[in-house]
Image: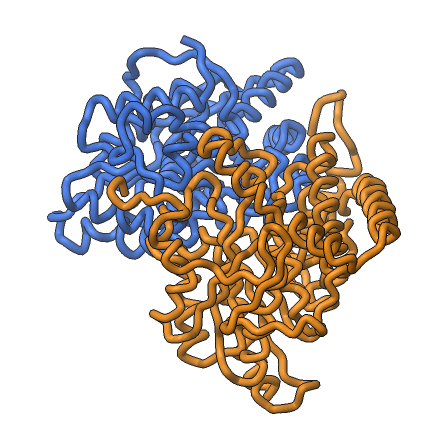
Chain colours: A orange, B blue
Amino acid sequence: MANAVQDPLSEASLADPPIQLLDPSGKLSTDARLPLDLATVDLPALYRDMALVRRLDTEAIALQRQGELGLWPSLRGQEAAQVGAAYALYDRDMVFPTYREHGVAWCRGLDPVSLLGLFRGTTLGGWDPYAHHFNLYTLVIGAQTLHAVGYGMGLYRDGSTGSGDPDRDTAVLAFLGDGALSEGETNEAFIWAAAQNLPVVFFCQNNQWAISAPYSVQSRIPAAQRAAGYGFPGIRVDGNDVLACLAATRQALDQARSGGGPTLIEAVTYRVNAHTTADDATRYRAAEETEDWTARDPLERLRAHLETTGAVTDEYFTDLEQRERDLAERLRAGCRGLADPDASSPFEHTYAQMPADLRQQLREHLEFVSTGPQDGEQK
Amino acid sequence: MTVSMVKALNDGLRKALTDDPQVLLMGEDIGRLGGVFRVTDGLRKDFGELRVVDTPLGEAGIVGAAIGLAMRGYRPVCEIQFDGFVYPAVNQIITQLAKLRHRSAGRISLPVVIRIPYGGGIGSIEHHSESPETYFAHTAGLKVVTCATPNDAFHMIQQAVAEDDPVVFLEPKRHYWTKGEVAPATEVPLEQAVIRRAGTDVTLIAYGPTVPVALEAADIAAEEGRSVEVVDLRSLSPWDVTTVRASVHRTGRAVVAHEAAFSHGFGAEVAARLQDEEFHFLEAPVVRVTGYDTPYPPSRLESDWLPGVDRILNAIDRSLSY
């Protein structure tokens, strides 16, 4: 351990700089490895969604501070990676998120209030994973990568990949973090996807920190370089550049849908806030590092571009501010309105048909709950 | 000295590291951060990163590597961050850690401790409130223990480290910040149950997180004129049948309380042994108060789902009704 520790921005990382299409000052550039037809990109919409997603995150943190949520894993700093990746999806593509993909959920059209129940303790899920082709959050690190593989195997068997029919071919987008690279299951997912040439895109948001462990605890090379060892392409993009994230994901999903197999995308970004609201990042990382990354803010650069190019009017920003306020209000009211689940719900959803023995337990439980606290004591 | 369970564990681990240079700690976020519950706070600073190891994010790796370290003469103490995250390591625990002594005809000894914060009642999200004890207690070759007081936390963790067999050390996270007196030494062996409160009418058997709940229930029962004896099992594998039998022999009645699910839970083992060995002395069936046979519910439902004081009192009533 001691002799393998490197700085996250070490020599190894710099040897393979992430591809960038929009620099921190808001200037566009091109890269032959990652062509992007700007005519196909709605820049004002991208910025609007990133700004709304940030507001969603800020509001959820506030709700946690007020005791309305038990916990919240903040996505701050990762808006470009998530919104960029989500913009590359077709509706029918299936997404397997971790527990931090609030930005992807937003772009998939989920009611943002539904993201709060899990963290309020009113549900273990909160939405229909099939309605928006967006699976429930997976809290166990790396577990979802194999679910994405299996879904991809199903697509292959259905003839929904590589058919050449643009209305049919479908891909899977699996999110993971840098910490998940160390789980055995992630390794198995890469192997399965490679060996069966599955239509799965692995989108790794390398936000530099797995709770308190810097990236160097997980790896001595950039994540994207690992793909070569499994036999599929890896691409490393600036995760704070929404255009690079969009272009890379679009390219990889196109390839997956057309039967070209998996890709690993490493979006180099930064977890600006602590791991969750229960974590204290000052215990393990320097404030200067966070400040340095904050200067590379994903929203600022696109805003700078929109302003300098005159792509939007003042009205656009006024309207956006109103939308942000409306969203915040919707979240506050929605959160407080989330009802506690019925006492019977855990019993009802354990099996397709409740076994007789469990039904008896439910009867006893409901009888106990209905009698209420006795003698003023807690139950 | 009065300290929290977290501090008692920290002190116990510090003593283990000081007393034996072969002891080392491994886990996710245990060094720089001091663990998500701060159980290892300050230990990396004092013992260095070779003895307090921040591991990559892989539980199979933590336990698998601990086995290799133990074969090289070390005594690793692994931390699994939460109960619900132990499962990637379960392959290593069941197929290797538990079986290598047997497989090697006694040549390989694996003095590995696996610390797991467990149990519910903390208002947390999924995978952070589970009670996986019977998976381990059902696996021969593992010892499974759980502390319920700061004093036990301090002494039992050191005893676990000194064991030559692998020990799954379950820490009731709901009581991490409960304070209690810690004595400088102990005479109680790791595997011995302890009578926390003497009584004559019914024996209430608990362990880990349900011990304080059982004591509270016993207090209320006493106000109603019922004398409840509370036994803290402390060790689930092996478990102290002798102490439990002796108590039930006196009271003629037994209630078992645990957070883990009802069916196939540890209470079933206790009930089976008691009916087998104390059949003629039992005045009532052994009553179990447990979690239900469902996955752990959303936290808004957990206070009713968990075996709380009222459900334990109802069980005592039921036992006494025979």
Quadrant in the rendering for residue B181: top left
Task: Classify the position of the N terminus of chain B by image quarter.
Answer: top left
Camera sees residue B43: yes
Q: Is residue B305 above or below residue A196?
A: above
Q: Residue at x 55, y 84 (%)?
A: A156
- Residue at x-position 79% and y-position 42%: A335
Q: Position of residue B187 (x, y in %)?
A: 28, 17
Tell which of B149 and B8 is nearer to you. Answer: B8
Query: Is residue B278 found left or right of B126 in the rendered image?
Result: left
Q: Quadrant of residue A226?
A: bottom left
Q: Let me know if residue A334 appears in the view.
A: no
> Camera-side residue: B140 or A259?
A259
Q: Which residue is nearer to you in this view: A271 or A38?
A: A38
* Quarter the C terminus of chain B occupies: top right
Identify whether B200 is placed above or below A349: above
Residue A151: % across, % down:
56, 74
Eyeballing the image, is B199 above or below A370? above
> What residue is drawn where x is 69% and y is 37%?
A61
User: Which percent across, then down, holds residue B48?
Assistant: 27, 30
